[in-house]
Image (spheres, coloured by chain):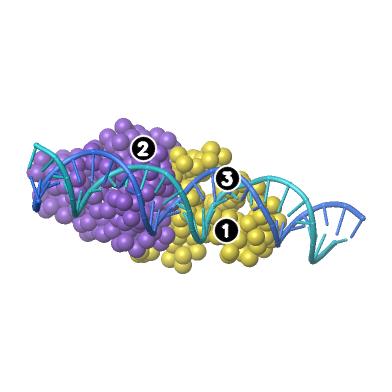
Chain colours: A yellow, B purple, C blue, D cyan
Amino acid sequence: MKSMTSTSGKILDTAQSLIVAGGYNGFSYADISAAIGIRKASIHHHFPTKAELVAVLVDRYRQQAEAGLNSLQEQFSSPAEQLRAYLNFWQMCIRDASLPFCICAMLAGEMQMLPEEVASRVRAHFHSLARWFTSVLAAGAEQGLFRLDKQPEEEAQMLMASVHGAMLSARAFSDPGLFTTIVTPQFTRLLAPAR
Amino acid sequence: MKSMTSTSGKILDTAQSLIVAGGYNGFSYADISAAIGIRKASIHHHFPTKAELVAVLVDRYRQQAEAGLNSLQEQFSSPAEQLRAYLNFWQMCIRDASLPFCICAMLAGEMQMLPEEVASRVRAHFHSLARWFTSVLAAGAEQGLFRLDKQPEEEAQMLMASVHGAMLSARAFSDPGLFTTIVTPQFTRLLAPAR
DNA sequence: TGCAATCTACCTACTAGTAGGCAGGCAAAA
DNA sequence: TTTTGCCTGCCTACTAGTAGGTAGATTGCA
C-alpha cells in the first residue's frame, strides 16, 4: 500500500467518507471520480470491483482500529483509562465530523446485501471489537476498577451496542453531543463504587 | 389508505422489507415490481416518487408504532411491564425475522442522504420514541418501580441507543438472540432494587 | 524503453421517472 | 334496461441518466 497521498489512498479516503454518509449502496465510482478528479476507469485500475474496493477499505480500517486500540493500551496502563480514551476518541471524531460513524457499523446495517467478501470482514471486525472490550473489561474487573454485573463478554456486547446506538442517535437527532450523553453514564456505571 | 391487501398496501409492505434489508438506496421500484408482479409505472401511479413512497411508508410505520405503544399502555398498567413488553415485541420480531430492524433506525444511518421529507419523518420518529421511553421511565420511577441514575430523558436516550445498537449487533453477528442478551440486563438495571 | 497510471470509448444493466392507452367497474342518464 | 361517462389501476413504450464495468490507447516518469 502506497502512502496516504497516493491515488489509491485518496480513493480509499473518499470511499470511506461516502460509506460513512450513505453505506455501500449510497456511493458509486462516479462519486469518487468527481471528488478526486480522475475517471472511473482509473479507479477500476486500482480496485477492479466495488466489492474489492470496500473489502480493502475495511481491511485498512481494521488495521487502523487495531493500531489505535494497541496504542491506547500502550499509552494507558489502566483498563479504565483505555476505555475512557476509546470513548473520547469517538466523541472527538463525531464532534469534528472527521469520522462520525464506525464504517463497519454502517456496513453492518446492510449486512445481508453485502458481497460476502465485505460481510465477512465486517463480521470479523465486530468480533475483534467485542474481544477488545471483553479483555479491557475483564482486566479492569480483575484490577478492581470495574464492577461487572455480568460476564465480561456480555458487558462488552452491551457497551458496544451502546456505542453504536449512540452514534446512530447522534446522527438521527443531528446532535453530536448526544453520543457523549449516552455513553458516559454507561461507562460510569462500569466503574467500581470504591472510586 | 385502503386495506393491507390492496396494491398500495402490498407496495408499502414490500418496500418496507426491502428497506429493512438495505436501506433507502438498497431498493428500487424494479425490486417491488418483481416482488408484486406489476409494472414499475403502476407503482408510480400509486406513489409518484420514491421519496413520497418512503415518506408514506414512514408515516404508516409511525402510526403502527404509536398504536402499538398505546396498546402496551392499555394492556399493562405497570410501566415496567410496558417496557418489558416493548423489548419482548422486538425480541420476537428479530427472532422470527418479521421485522428484524427498526425502519427509522435503518434510515437514520443514511440520514444526510435522505430526501428532506423522509429525513424529517425519521427525526420525528426518534423524538416520539424518546418521549415514550421518557414517560414510561418517569412514571416507573414515580411508582418506585425503576431506580434511575440520571434524568428520565437521559435514561431514555441510553435505553433507546441500546435497543438500536442491539439490533445492529444481532445483525452483525447473525445472532438474533444477541438482542435479548444485550437489552435484558439494561432493562434489569433500571428496576428498583426492592424488587 | 518499459511500466504504471491515466485516458477515451464503449458496454450492459439498471434507476427513477413520463405520457398516453386500455380495461374494468360503477354510477348516472337516456 | 342499456348506454355512456368517469375513474382507478393497470399496461406499453419511452426518456435521460447512472451504475459497475471492459478494452485498448495514451501519457508521464524513472
Marks 1 and 2: which is nearer the front?
2
Q: Which residue is mark 2?
A: B37
Mark 2 and mark 3: Cα distance apart in space: 30 Å
Q: Is residue A5 visible?
A: yes
* Crowdedness near tag 2: few (<14), some (14–19) or many (≥20) residues, C-alpha within 10 Å: few
A15, above or below A97, in the image: above
Instruction: Name the secondary structure under disc 1.
Output: helix
Q: Amino acid at mark 1?
A: Ala
Q: Which residue is mark 1?
A: A30
Q: Is A156 or B132 nearer to us in this picture?
A: B132
Q: Quadrant of the C terminus of chain A?
A: bottom left
Pair 3/1: label in front: 1
- Structural distance between the alpha carbons of marks 3 and 1: 15 Å
Task: From the viewer's side, name the closer residue of D24 and B182.
Answer: D24
At a point 42% along the width and 60% down the height, the residue shown is B113
Q: Position of residue A28 (x, y in %)?
A: 54, 55
Give the mark nearest the N terminus, 3 or 1.
Answer: 1
Real-space Cα separation, disc 1 to disc 2, in angstroms: 32 Å
Question: Residue B14 at x, y = what percent?
Answer: 33, 41
Task: Find disc 3 in the rendering and name its residue.
Answer: A51
Label 2 vs label 3, nearer the camera: 2
Q: Where's residue D25, x and y in %?
A: 79, 57
Q: Image point 58% across, 64% down: which residue?
A: A34
